[in-house]
Image: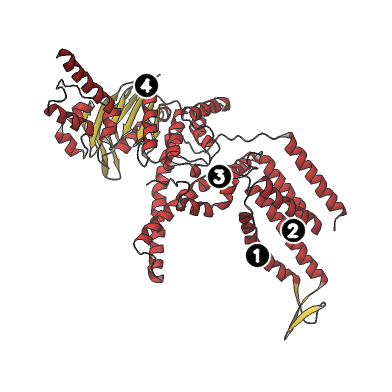
Amino acid sequence: MPCKLEIKNISFAYENKNVLRNISLSIDPGEKIAVMGANGAGKSTLFLNLNGVLTPDTGDIYLDGIRILKKNRKILNKKVGLVFQEADSQIIASNVRSEISFGPINMGLDRQEVIKRVDEAVSYMSLEGFENRAPQYLSGGEKKRVSIADILAMHSDVLIFDEPMTALDPVSANDTEEILNKLSAEGRTLIASTHDSDFAYRFAKRIIVMCEGEVIADGTPYEIFSQPDVIKKAHIKKPVLMTVWEGLINLDIAGNDGKYPVTEAEALEMLTLKYKGKESSQ
Amino acid sequence: MSVCVPPGSKQFFLLVKFMLIDHYAQLSGLRKYNSSAKVAFAFLNLCIVIAVNKITLSLFVIVFMSLTALLKGKTPFKVYTRLMSIPLTFIVLSCIMIGVEFSSRPLGKYFISLHFIYAGITRNSALTAVKVFFKAMAGISSLYLLSLSTPVNEIVMVLERLRLPKIFTELMHLIYRYIFILFDTAFRMQISAKARLGFCGFKTSCKSFAMVAGSLFISALKKSQAYYDALLSRGYDGRLEFLSEEYPLKARHILSAAIYFVVLFLIAKVGV
C-alpha cells in the first residue's frame, strides 16, 4: 500500500554548511513529483534524508503518521527506495542477481522470498540473460535498469530517482522514462530530481523547486514554469513545448483556454481538434 | 561522471586487456559448469601434481588442461599461449638456478670454471630442474583452466561457501567490483592529461603521473562515501550478504572428472 510521507521543518548541515533549511513538504500516495534546482541546491541531501541515510539536524519526518526516530529509521530504508544518480555508485555486488538480492536480504526475508523478488525485479526490468553478468560488462542503460531493479526488489512504496536521465543515451533515457511512467501507473509514489525542464514538464504532476537548501516553489508544472522569477532563481529553463505553445497562442494559432499540452502528440491533437472544429463550423 | 565502458570502444579493449582472464572467463564454454566443482577439480588436480613426482603425469596434465581450455573453453590460442608465456619466463629462470650446481671441485659431465668455484650440471640436478619445470607448468595450467572458465565473482562465492572469514570474501567482492571503476577513472584522467600534452616528455610525464595519482586518490575517497551511502540506503548493517546460486552439477561432468582422475592414478602408478 502506498504511504504518505511528511517532512516538517527539517534542516541539515554538512560540517558548518547548511544544505537544507527548514523544509516542509507533504507527499501523498501515488504522487508524481519532479524536484528541480541548480547543482548544490540540496536535492540529493533531501533524498538521503527521506531515505533515512542521513538524519535531519532539526525537524521531523513522518511516514503514514509515524514519527521517524533514530531507532525506527530502518523503516525509511524499506519504504522509501532511492535510486542513485550514478548507477556505479549504487551497484556493489559482482553480478546482477547478487546485486538485486542485497536489499531484500538486508530486510531479513527468507531465501525463497528473496529469490522470488529478485526474479520479479529481473523480469520487470527486462534483465533476463544478464543475471550472472558482472556490472563492468553492462552498458550505462543496463546499469540504470539494474539500479532500479535493486529498489523494486525491496517493494518500496515511495521511489526516489536522483537525476535518472544523467549520462544516458536518448534510447536508454526514453526506456527509463517509460519505466517511471509504468511504475506511476501502478500507483507508486515517484519523486525524481532533474535539470531537464522538458522531462519534468511531461513527467510530473507536481514540481518542487529548490534553491540554496530551501523550497522556493511548489506547484503544478504550469504554475512553476509561469513564474519567471522562480525560473531565474533556480537556474532552470522553460520547457520548449510550453514556450512554443505560448508563441502559438500569441499568433492566435492555438486556443487561449488556459490548457497547455504536456506532450507533442497532445499538442498536435489539440491543434487538430481546434482546426477540425473551425472547418466544421464553416 | 559516467563510468560506463561501451563495448567495442578503444577504452573497452584496454580494460579487457587489463582484465583479460576475467573477460575470457565470462565468455568461456565451461562457464556454465558448476563453479564449486571446478574449484574442487582444480584444487585436487593441483594437489596430485604436487604430490606425484612424475614427469609423464605433469605432461599429461599440461596437455589435458591446455586442450580443455582451448577446445572446450574456447579460449583463443594466441591468448592462451600469451598467458602461459608469462609464468614460463620465471619458471625457466628458476629451473636454471635449480639445475646448475656450484662446487669447489668439478661436478658432473658439463661444468665451467669460475676461477674459485665450478658451476656444473649433474644428471640429478638436471632431472630435478626438468621435474620442477613440468610440475610448475602443470599446476599453472590447471589453475589457468579454473580462472579462464570461472569469473572471479563465482570463485568468491565458492570461497564463501567454504566458510572463509566474511571479511575476506566481502573485501574480495568490493575490490573486484571497484578495481574496474578505479581503472576506468584513472584511464579517463590519463586521457585528459594526454589531451593537454601531459605526457610529451619525461619530466612532464612524471609530473602528470603524480597529478593523476593524487586526483585518483581523492576521487576514490569521495566515491567511497557515495558507496557507503548506497549501502546504507538499502539497509546495510555491517554485513554484506548476497544471494549466491550456481549452475547445477551434472552427472556427466562428475563421470568425466572421475575418468580423468582414474587416468591420473594409472599414470601415477605406471608412468615415469
Q: Is residue B204 left or right of residue B7?
A: left
User: Toward which corner of the image does residue A246 lie, by quadrant?
Assistant: top left
Q: Neighbour class for label 1 at 10 Å: few (<14), some, many (≥20)?
A: few
Mark-to-mark CA distance, 4 and 3: 43 Å
Labels 3 and 2: the sequence-earlier one: 2
Mark carried by residue B167: 3
Mark carried by residue A111: none
Does residue B30 lie above or below A123 as drawn? below
Q: Neighbour class for label 2 at 10 Å: few (<14), some, many (≥20)?
A: many
Q: Secondary structure at mark 3?
A: helix
Q: Neighbour class for label 3 at 10 Å: few (<14), some, many (≥20)?
A: few
Percent of width and height locating residue B243: 56, 34
> Looking at the picture, which amino acid does disc 1 mark?
Phe
User: Toward which corner of the image does residue A262 lie, by quadrant?
Assistant: top left
Percent of width and height locating residue A232: 17, 38
Percent of width and height locating residue A136: 49, 45
